Image (cartoon, grey):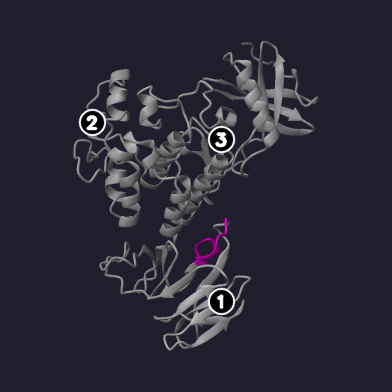
Amino acid sequence: MSELKNGTRVQLTNGKSCTVKKELGRGGQGIVYLVDYEGKDYALKWYIVDYPDAFMNNLEKNCKAGAPTKNFLWPIAVARRQYDSFGYVMQLRPQGYEEMAMYILAKARFASLDAMFNACLQICTGFMELHKRGLCYQDMNDGNFFINPRTGDVLVCDNDNVAPNGVDVGILGKSGYMAPEIVERESAPNRHTDYFSQAVCLFILIYLNKPFEGARYLSCPCLSPEAERKLFGKGAVFICDPTDNSNRPVKGIHNNVINRWPLFPKYLQKAFVAAFSKEAICTPGKRLLDKKWQEVIIQLRSLYIKCPQCGEHTFYDPTTADNRCLECGRTVPAVTSLFVGHYAIPLAEGQKIYCCQVKNEPDYDKVAATVVKNAAGKLGLKNQSDMPWTVMLPTGEVRVVKPGEGMPAAKGLKIRFGQNETGEIK
């Protein structure tokens, strides 16, 4: 496959063209060039391996359909076969984004846990929308994500592997991220293998360690095909498996997960234990879906509150009796909480309740209510949604809280959020 020189004019299938300005980088599949397309700078990925017409046709189909969400650096134009190859045009990655691998190496850090929550939610939501289209990503790994450490905003690159669920475009994946059935060569990529790879990526972002690289991984002198099947195939063992100690993280090497695993709520631990259980490893249909992961991260975000004693942020689980502040180490006094739908939301000052928690609202950042403190020091809920609430008192009396109005955050109250979920304060 030929390389392109500066000034080369590349014809596109949409009848337009772009002009190569300089090389930006290269990898195993191709070379990325900076190009001028319609008077603006874009990136052109130019393949240096030979792909069949079916690959190109799938790429053009995705290009015409458009990106599932704004998180994808999606193909916007496909280059015709010329100069012994072809490629596609996409938007450039903006400044301020770091490769996911930099987070593992601690060369990039989230500015806050809120930024980390945002990154995880954008990943879950982006792939949920992709899967709704009947597509699968096929090659999810740390090289596909660019993340802004300040905001948590995510951009997904290398979208040329995206294909209809069950369609094999000849891409297997990256070691440590592939689902076990792909490692065992028993399956081609599909949405169930995506679910597995997504859980791996979420685990890495939260715990800064790969979920299957513990003591067993260190005992392998080289990653031969046989060793890869042992470590990442159907015999894989999660490093935090509650019953199998054979692949535990090693002190001095896997310090990130050793230190961070106990800091996050048991609720999150249980989700990863389920995602990487022997059942989920061997049975693709038992894996956690991206919708479920979205709910898990939304719940995790709600458990992150200000400690009533020291004012610093910590996790508080309303279903657990013993909650200790991560900062001051003291027991966090019981916090009145709202239980609604799938969610338990501690009502600490400043806490937000999101529309996605009280109604079928896809925007996970749209706020329905905020916990505020009145002049007397009492906590209440301010209705910031566009719908009135119906509040049922323990006496049976019913009151209406209009948008912009408030109500006490008192135990025993039941709230009907418009025509949607009914929650109870306990």
Side (left or right) of 368 relative to 222: right
Q: Secondary structure at mark 3?
A: strand
Residue beneath disc 1 = 389
Residue beneath disc 2 = 216
420 up-or-down from 151: above or below: below
How crowded is the residue under tag 3: few (<14 C-alpha within 10 Å), some, or many (20+)? Answer: many
Which segment did they paint magenta?
353-362
Residue type marked 1: Trp
Q: In the rendered image, is residue 111 in sight?
A: no
Q: Nearer the viewer, residue 225 or 389?
A: 389
Instruction: Report the residue at 42% width, 54% height from top.
Output: 296
Which sits earlier in the primary sequence, circle 1 or circle 2? 2
Side (left or right) of 108 relative to 64: left
Quadrant of the snapshot with the C terminus: bottom left
Nearest to the eye among marks 1 and 2: give it.
Answer: 1
Q: Which mark is residue 425?
A: none
Tell me how far mark 3 sits from mark 1, CA to CA: 39 Å
Quadrant of the snapshot with the N terminus: top right
Q: Secondary structure at mark 2?
A: helix
Residue beneath disc 3 = 135
Tell me how far mark 3 sits from mark 2, CA to CA: 34 Å
Residue 213 highlighted magenta (yes or no): no
Which sits earlier in the primary sequence, circle 3 or circle 2? 3
